[in-house]
Image (cartoon, rainbow, N blue to C red):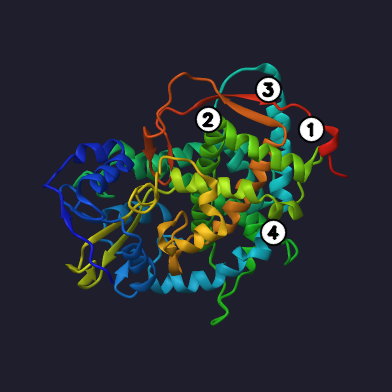
Amino acid sequence: MSAVPLGVAPRFWKQWVMGRNPVRYLDLLRDRFGDLVRARGFFDFYLVNDPELVGTVLVNKERIVDRVDPRNPIYRRIANIGRSGLATSGPQHWRQQRRRIAPLFGASAIRGFGASMIAAAVEWSERWDARSRAGTALDLKDEMNELSLEVNTRCLFDAELRDDHARLQRWFDAMKDYLQAFPYPLVSAWWFPSPLHLRTKRALRGFDRWAAELIAQRRAAPRAPDAADMITRMLNARDPETGEGMSDEEITHEMLTFLIAGFESTSSALLWTFYHLATKPDVEARVHAELDAVLGDRPLRMEDLPRLDYTRRVLDEVMRQTPSVWFMARTTLEDVELGGHRIPKGSNLLLSPPTLHNNPRVWPAPERFDPDRFLPDAVAARHASAYIPFGRGPHACIGSHFSLQEMLVVTATLGRRFRVVMAQDRFDPTDVRAGLSVYPRHGIRMRIERRAAVPARKRTAA
């Protein structure tokens, strides 16, 4: 392993920034102190921002670097929400759950959700048609939240649950407020009866009751074993080694994990996708040209997705420059050597995709939006851990194929008929709120415009 200088920030150095905008704070640490930084204050941690070291932590050190150590205050907050879910369970339970759930997220299984994703996106295009005629501005954050929640509830439950969206969003907002709160000593303890903690616990109880009703309905009226919805798949899932199924509580916790993590990260990615298209006319023109050439004036089909090569590279570059997930936390279970330095047992390690993906020592001119960074030769020339929107190694996001498919379906379906244009004069893409995902702090105002009809010479046969 190559040596990497260890920067040591003064105690409490600019930690007030972390409370408001942790993405900006980690960028400041990177720019001032380098790619391996020890930060001390209310929360002591090491920022790991060199691709080789990132790969070491995520891929090569799983037995001595744990993501679920209760000493890590960031983990404790996430675990209070996720409980026994795949994202926060301990090693033994995680292995069992992973064996049960992994087949549900294989490539062929995810393709089975394609029809539901396309149907939801087509319905949304009719909504955007009305929006375009009205000409009124909308908050794209709210719009993408609602759209992604619709796609995810359809795929998870194979049911029309739009009437439940308002309370789901209310519960998720309470949980996100909790996750975004700075982990001050004592007051951040889960037992502390703060208004934020009480509101979060009410939201968890509300979601649990709602999920229990859905599970009970599905148990009372079982669907065919090959049904596409995720509840049926989880009810039928078995550990291939032990034959054990999942309890209702385990299914409830996984439902929350899939929903809040899945719809949150995809919603954020879609928001930033349409922002980049709205502010980069040359990129938008190439995306529209590809959609016109592949789709013409007909709706998207699943077999079209592999042909949307440039559009997929645009999504990759969106997740490079403005990734949804801002951190991955690990804790050392024994002394670890990183970059030629001894990292003591019990240390908190923080890996940040935005800080890594915009590191000028890793990505030349990171502020330039360039989808051709993801041409095959460019990808092969980079370190495999230079780009980690979904993590790497055994704990990489199990829903990455689902999220990428949803992003491509929505971008292609809406982009075929509409443009999104800025409806505000000033917008700072670095002024963000960071919880489970990264969003503009004050939303982003946009207008929907109809695209011109596809020229007859570009139309494809239906």
- Which label's residue is closer to the chain start, 3 or 4? 4
Dot 4 corresponds to which residue? Answer: 111
Q: Are marks 3 and 2 in contact (CB under 8 Å)?
A: no
Q: Residue furthest right?
A: 461
Q: Would you say 117 lies left or right of 192 here?
A: right
- Which label's residue is closer to the chain start, 4 or 1? 4
Residue 249, can we see it?
no
Looking at numbered disc 2 in the image, what kind of residue is underneath it?
A: Thr
Residue 199 % position (x, y) = 38, 39
Q: Residue furthest bottom?
A: 241
Give how far apart the Cα atoms at labels 3 and 2 are.
18 Å
Q: Residue at x 15, y 49 (%)?
A: 9
Q: Secondary structure at mark 4?
A: helix
Query: Can you tell which mark lies on residue 132?
Result: 3
Q: Are marks 4 and 2 in contact (CB under 8 Å)?
A: no
Q: Quadrant for the C terminus, please.
A: top right
Q: Quadrant for the N terminus, please.
A: bottom left
Dot 1 corresponds to which residue? Answer: 454
Image depth: mark 1 or mark 3 in front: 1
